[in-house]
Amino acid sequence: MVRALVFGLGCVWTASAYAGPGDHIRVGEATITPSISLGIEHSTNVYHADSDVVGGTDFRLAPGLQIGVDGPDLRFSLSGEYELRKYFQPSLTSLDRFSDFQIGTSLEALRRGPIGFGIADSIGLRNSPTDIPSSDAPFQTQFRNQLDGSVNIRPGSALQIRLGGRWAFDDIQVASGITSSRAFNRKHSGGPTLAVEWNFFPRTAVLLDGSYEFHRWGENVIDTVDSATSDSLGDELAKPDSDHFRISLGMQGRVTQKIVVVLRAGYGFANYDEASVDGGESASTEGYAEDLRGAEHLLLNASFRYDFSERDQFVLGYEKDFNDVFFSNYAAYHRVFSRVNKRISKRFGTAGELGVRYEDYAGEIARQDLFLEAEASFSTYINDWADISLGAAFDRRGSSDPDVLYNDLNVYLRSNFVY
């Protein structure tokens, strides 16, 4: 009897889990989608240096996995990607990366009832190159774990209120030569969140969002190394704790069958606690007594989207906001962006992205940056589960601090496979 039961379950699993390439793997209500990306990339400025530019070519491997369940009362998703980079030049082996990854999961339960709940978690580690080629590990490394949860209240079919909270942990390491060790700082942040969506028309929703976040750093005074590559930091760097608040009100509407418009405006503040740094005695002289000021309190978000089809879109947007940064107090920024994805035919497609971001950094390190990023690619779809992409990406950072200027052109050829 037991053998018969095991044999029967095995047959059901085999039958339900079988799928050909491009069909994904289906087990009950779950859809499992493995993928892998292989490619060769050439960068003209691998260290993002302002001078003595070095180019390099690497092999990139990125396997991924997605699992999704979408039912009437339960929605679940799990996704992950691991990224490896290996340089062909022996002189660039310090830039090899074997630890980059990103994992995200979310669960939304009781979706049709008057009260439900949702939870989401994302964990990732990313290595970004720096302009210190002499370092054994010329990276800025950031590990981040963010957890979000909410109780979802639905007083009626048109109104949904999400009362929740957020917690995040950041661990930041820098290239050796900036501090006595790569360990730079750690941060806990989080607080309550609110999101209200009122669909008073079938195609239009009023959106209200709010959050209060505390940012608490492990080290408020960081000992730095005064070397030729990092002398702008001095002997010590102050990083005060802070409290941030945001609230915004807006509207999202499908103007026509193909056009979606989003408009939001809000208010925010970021208050930095000078007393968290040695009692605040040197706040005025060292420059870290900087809170959000003037027009920086105003938050704006606007976007226009045109849907060529369900997968093909053109987006144009503008964003004005601020964020906490690990090497100073905060950065207030303006960002204009645009992107397009268009399938030309069954076998060919194009994609493009353009963004310009003005950043005003305030704190002990004060500077103004203008960051430009542009990317374009052309793809050939061999079939439903494989494609080859040829593309180029260009990054340029201009700054009032000449030490952080750089230009980088990256050209790549990638093959992508989805089971």
Image: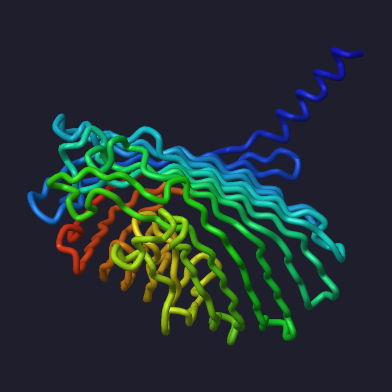
For this view, does 72 lie left or right of residue 123?
right
For this view, does 19 lie left or right of residue 400?
right
**Protein image colouring:** rainbow
Q: 223 or 408: nearer the eye?
A: 223
For this view, does 378 lie left or right of residue 243?
left
For this view, does 348 lie left or right of residue 165?
left
Where does residue 44 sit, x and y in percent of width and height?
16, 51
Q: Residue furthest right?
A: 1
- Up the image or down, 129 lies above or below 251; here it is above
Where does residue 58 sit, x and y in percent of width and height?
24, 39
| Residue 30, picture quadrant | top right
Residue name at image x 32 percent, y 59 percent: 378
- Up the image or down, 307 lies above or below 283; here it is below
Q: Residue furthest left?
A: 52
Q: 274 or 175: nearer the eye?
A: 274
| Residue 101 visible | yes
| Residue 70 visible | no
- Up the image or down, 314 lies above or below 89; here it is below
| Residue 265, picture quadrant | bottom right
Where does residue 249 sit, x and y in percent of width and height?
61, 82
